């Protein structure tokens, strides 16, 4: 695997060395030499890029990512379509208002695209360095004349190419609404500029996370976190630059003049008090999904409004602003990559797990007064369900368990910080659903990862020759996962119950609760099953979400929307139960077969 | 000495076959390992050792044929088999962030050893493999040899009667190797039946009482260690030195039907007899009768390793 990359750069490195040595130290004839420098640097990076691309070509995930990108856009269209169905006003006696449809669709799709770029691109890079570290090849690269920055840059460039495919798969879709009217090519170009910034930031976030973590799950989590953070900064940056460059043009000669207020162009931001709603309105502003205050109180398209208000001579200012922002993103991501390179340098040498550190961690994470209780409970688990114990034994597992509870509490507080008003209880409930979804993401990845460790370290083979039967093995693991997420799920359930009581909504339909309870039961099974089918944690986790959450949602919703197979809004809840039950059973049986036939063997690298 | 009692088979396979897709990894293996044997299972890379042991350990199911351990069929009575075997794969299968005792405790629980007995058992097996001092250590901080011994301790945790060890000595330094071998002999004395696989025949020749050699999924020898050479050496080699021109002696020898090949190497003549049973006196007789002046005649001491190499020459996959 490393053959070409180990022999190749040596020669290039020599030339590089010669070029550097020849540089007249006193003289700073920078121009030509700088260019030479850059040329050499690129040549030096080539082996890394090539190797990276070749390695990723073997990863089925690259393919899946593209498919997912397209699927996500499909979802965008779905969102637009759903919204459209809500917008009765748009359907006039003359038929559907095509321009409004174009505006709507553009907003929904661009929104989906930004989210997809912000959430999927970090995944591209998230495991690129950490994997080399786990497999020990990072140390081998160290033996070549490559510098940390070369490796990080080379890998990033390779991933940028991949990211670009994702970007280019999605971008053309945005011309669809342009055809419908209401939005123009200027919208399209602006979206292209802004979204490129999101792409670049997402990639560098993944790279940094990958350089900081060794474990793939941690790297993925950190990559997503960083990316969301960077996205927030990006949105704020867009707002700031809009104010600095575009607003003066609006106020300039030929503009709307005194009559206009910034509020008109930034719906939401000045009305909202809470962090969440402000964030959402920022996102709406940057993606032109001009949904104003809630989902059904009327629709405006921010971009169209601004363009309509901009004097003809100043139409380019927004593009300029976006270009500046993109430049800023490039600089920022280079800085991030530089930081990543620095941490790669300090991670060159793979350290064995330090005994003292591990002890300390265990001590710190196990409060003394709880130790006895904890030990006793763990022992009980070990006796009754050794496989479940595996899932709970480590301090890490406890951290994850209570970390989720903490995250749920924080999330609830975030929601409570939102402004009061008519939509409050509905917002609260929506927030509940978002938190439940987040928890399901955790469940999906945790289950998709759970037998992975055993497969990697070989303990799986040992477990399968103990007297534990395959179903016992599966049930044990499932119980472990359920227990891990039970406190957080219970918290959500209790709050939901309270919400129902407080808002006197006890009698309303309970479909969402049924749906989430079903997901909580079924997603672990699906996750375990898919972890046997897919090699990468990422693809297994995402596929689990797709199969266990998105698929039932889409299917049952579609059925009930079209009143197919006797499904309607009234019995959607029970349909879900039936569907999810069938899915769980199918996954369990399949998993049982796969384990009994040892089918995971050939999947091992 | 009285005649030893008829040995009872601990492990028996009949026509054992395993396919991976269309690839035949194991073909018609008939193997018998008696109780109390320390049985060497030898083959080069890809010969099918791991596949065989995995089938015996109930991890894989055979594509054809049967295998039984102490009379229990590995497919039909897998559960019973699992209680009486200890299987150590050719990798460690350890959790690096577990402590040594924690790890053994966990597997003890998997084998449903009551918790009251478990602590004692864990101590005993650690004592046996010489890891007592490391009982509280993190597994990730153990050396390779220690991890191997931990693997051995894990195998013993439920006191199995039959041990299936896949290359337990690979990657160990000579000293650790000897230590592991000593542990195995101790276990044999305790009455356990042990099957141990290896690439290296000579490593096992002093340890095992019986060996089997497997190549490309086929059994080519099974029996006592001493028998390997007799059965497998395709021809006996004699080294001859004559004074004067060896050419004449070569011609003389070539005329004999018992001799399959003659060549000169460094002025000495290497004579290969066509079959093992033929009397090597034939060489001396031919030379002397033909008038050659014989200075030296010596039989080549073929090492076990060379026998093994000959058998498997060019056959590694
Ligand atoms: N999971 C698998 N899928 C496909 N083929 C396999 C699998 N496992 C083993 N094989 C093939 O079966 C044959 C026998 O393999 P096996 O692992 O039993 O050999 P071995 O004697 O243990 O070799 P080694 O000394 O290298 O460990 C090999 O040709 C191997 O390629
Ligand atoms: Mg093997």
Image (cartoon, coloured by chain):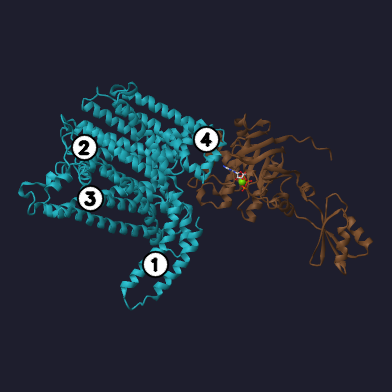
Chain colours: A cyan, B brown
Tag 1 and tag 2 share a subunit: yes
Mark 4 surroundings: few (<14), some (14-19) or many (≥20) residues within 10 A:
some
Single out the mark in the foreground, 1 or 2.
2
Question: Foreground: A162 or A422?
Answer: A162
Mark 2 surroundings: few (<14), some (14-19) or many (≥20) residues within 10 A:
many
Q: Are marks 1 and 4 in contact (CB under 8 Å)?
A: no
Q: How many marks?
A: 4
Q: Which of marks 1 and 3 is nearer the N terminus?
A: 1
Tag 1 and tag 3 share a subunit: yes
Q: Distance between the Cα atoms at labels 3 and 2?
A: 19 Å
Residue A190 got which mark?
A: 3
* Mark 3 residue's CB less than 8 Å from ligand 1: no
Quadrant of the rendered structure where residue A114 is? top left
Q: Are marks 3 and 2 in contact (CB under 8 Å)?
A: no
**What is the chain identity of the residue bearing mark 1?**
A
Could you tell whether A92 is left or right of A476 in the image? Answer: left
SS class, disc 3: helix
Residue A40 got which mark?
A: 1
**What is the chain identity of the residue bearing mark 2?**
A
Q: Is residue B240 above or below residue A114?
A: below
> Which residue is depicted at the point 41% across and 34% down?
A524
Name the residue furthest left.
A258
Name the residue furthest top.
A566
Q: Which of marks 3 and 2 is nearer the N terminus?
A: 2
SS class, disc 2: helix
Single out the mark in the foreground, 3 or 4.
3
Please name the residue that numbered disc 4 is placed on: A595
């Amino acid at each position: 695997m490393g053959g070409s990359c180990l022999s190749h750069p040596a020669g290039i490195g020599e030339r590089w060395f010669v070029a550097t040595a020849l540089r007249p130290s006193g003289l700073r004839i920078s121009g030509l030499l700088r260019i030479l420098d850059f040329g050499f640097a690129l040549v030096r990076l080539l082996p890394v890029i090539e190797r990276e691309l070749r390695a990723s070509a073997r990863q089925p995930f690259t393919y899946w990512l593209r498919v997912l990108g397209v699927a996500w856009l499909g979802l965008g269209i779905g969102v637009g379509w759903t919204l459209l169905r809500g917008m009765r006003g748009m359907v006039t006696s003359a038929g559907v208002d095509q321009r409004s449809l174009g505006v709507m669709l553009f907003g929904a799709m661009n929104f989906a695209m930004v989210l997809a770029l912000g959430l999927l691109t970090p995944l591209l890079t998230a495991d690129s360095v950490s994997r080399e570290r786990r497999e020990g090849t990072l140390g081998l690269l160290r033996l070549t004349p490559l510098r940390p920055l070369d490796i990080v840059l080379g890998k990033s460039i390779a991933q940028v190419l991949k990211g670009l495919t994702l970007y280019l798969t999605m971008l053309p879709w945005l011309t669809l609404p342009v055809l419908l009217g209401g939005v123009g090519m200027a919208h399209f170009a602006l979206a292209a500029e802004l979204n490129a910034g999101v792409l670049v930031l997402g990639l560098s976030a993944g790279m940094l996370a990958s350089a900081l973590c060794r474990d793939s799950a941690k790297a993925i989590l950190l990559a997503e976190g960083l990316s969301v953070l960077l996205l927030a900064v990006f949105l704020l940056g867009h707002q700031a630059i809009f104010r600095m460059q575009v607003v003066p043009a609006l106020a300039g000669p030929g503009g709307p003049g005194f009559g206009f207020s910034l509020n008109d162009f930034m719906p939401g931001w000045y009305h909202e008090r809470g962090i969440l709603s402000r964030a959402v309105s920022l996102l709406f502003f940057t993606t032109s999904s001009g949904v104003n205050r809630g989902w059904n109180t009327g629709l405006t398209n921010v971009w169209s409004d601004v363009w309509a208000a901009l004097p003809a001579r100043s139409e380019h200012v927004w593009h300029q602003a976006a270009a500046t922002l993109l430049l800023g993103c490039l600089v920022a991501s280079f800085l991030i990559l530089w930081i990543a390179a620095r941490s790669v340098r300090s991670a060159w040498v793979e350290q064995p797990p330090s005994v003292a550190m591990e002890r300390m961690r265990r001590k710190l994470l196990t409060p003394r007064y709880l130790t006895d209780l904890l030990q006793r409970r763990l022992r009980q688990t070990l006796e009754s369900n050794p496989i479940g114990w595996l899932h709970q034994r480590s301090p890490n597992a406890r951290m994850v368990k209570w970390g989720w509870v903490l995250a749920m509490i924080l999330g609830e507080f975030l929601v409570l910080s939102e402004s009061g008003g008519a939509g409050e209880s509905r917002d609260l409930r929506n927030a509940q659903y978002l938190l439940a979804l987040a928890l399901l993401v955790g469940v999906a990845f945790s289950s998709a990862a759970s037998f992975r460790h055993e497969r990697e370290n070989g303990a799986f083979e040992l477990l399968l020759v103990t007297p534990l039967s395959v179903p016992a093995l599966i049930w044990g693991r499932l119980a472990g996962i359920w227990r891990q997420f039970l406190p957080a799920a219970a918290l959500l359930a209790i709050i939901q119950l309270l919400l129902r009581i407080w808002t006197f909504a006890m009698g309303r339909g309970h479909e969402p609760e049924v749906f989430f309870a079903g997901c909580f039961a079924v997603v672990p099974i699906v996750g375990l099953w898919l972890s046997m089918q897919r090699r990468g944690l990422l693809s297994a986790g995402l596929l689990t979400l797709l199969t266990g959450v998105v698929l039932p949602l889409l299917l049952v919703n579609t059925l009930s929307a079209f009143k197919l197979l006797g499904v309607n809004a009234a019995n959607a809840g029970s349909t879900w139960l039936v569907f999810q039950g069938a899915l769980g059973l199918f996954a369990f049986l399949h998993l049982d077969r796969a384990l009994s036939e040892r089918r995971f063997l050939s999947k091992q690298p | 000495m009285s005649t030893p009692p008829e040995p009872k088979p601990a492990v028996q396979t009949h026509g054992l076959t395993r396919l991976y897709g269309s690839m035949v990894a194991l073909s018609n293996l008939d193997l018998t390992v008696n109780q109390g044997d320390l049985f060497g299972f030898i083959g080069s890379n890809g010969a099918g050792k791991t596949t065989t042991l995995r089938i015996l350990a109930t991890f894989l199911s055979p594509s054809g044929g049967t295998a039984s351990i102490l009379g229990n069929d590995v497919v039909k009575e897998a559960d019973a088999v699992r209680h009486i075997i200890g299987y150590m794969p050719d990798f460690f299968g350890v959790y690096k962030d577990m402590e040594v005792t924690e790890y053994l405790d966990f597997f003890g629980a998997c084998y449903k050893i009551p918790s009251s007995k478990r602590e004692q058992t864990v101590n005993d097996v650690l004592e046996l493999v010489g890891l007592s001092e490391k009982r509280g250590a993190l597994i990730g901080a153990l050396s390779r040899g220690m991890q191997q011994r931990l693997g051995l301790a894990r195998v013993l945790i439920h006191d199995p009667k039959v041990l299936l060890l896949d290359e337990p000595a690979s990657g160990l330094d000579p000293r650790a190797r000897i230590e592991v071998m000593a542990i195995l002999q101790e276990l044999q004395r305790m009455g356990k039946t042990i099957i141990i696989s290896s690439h290296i025949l000579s490593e096992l020749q002093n340890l095992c009482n019986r060996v089997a050699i497997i190549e490309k999924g086929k059994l080519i020898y099974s029996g006592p260690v001493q028998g390997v050479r007799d059965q497998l050496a395709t021809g006996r080699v004699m080294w001859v030195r004559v004074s004067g021109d060896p050419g004449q002696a070569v011609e003389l020898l070539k005329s004999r039907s018992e001799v399959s090949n003659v060549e000169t190497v460094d002025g000495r003549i290497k004579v290969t007899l066509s079959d093992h049973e033929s009397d090597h006196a034939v060489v001396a007789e031919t030379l002397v009768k033909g008038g050659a002046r014989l200075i030296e005649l010596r039989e080549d001491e073929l090492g076990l390793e060379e026998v093994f190499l000959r058998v498997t020459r060019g056959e590694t996959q």
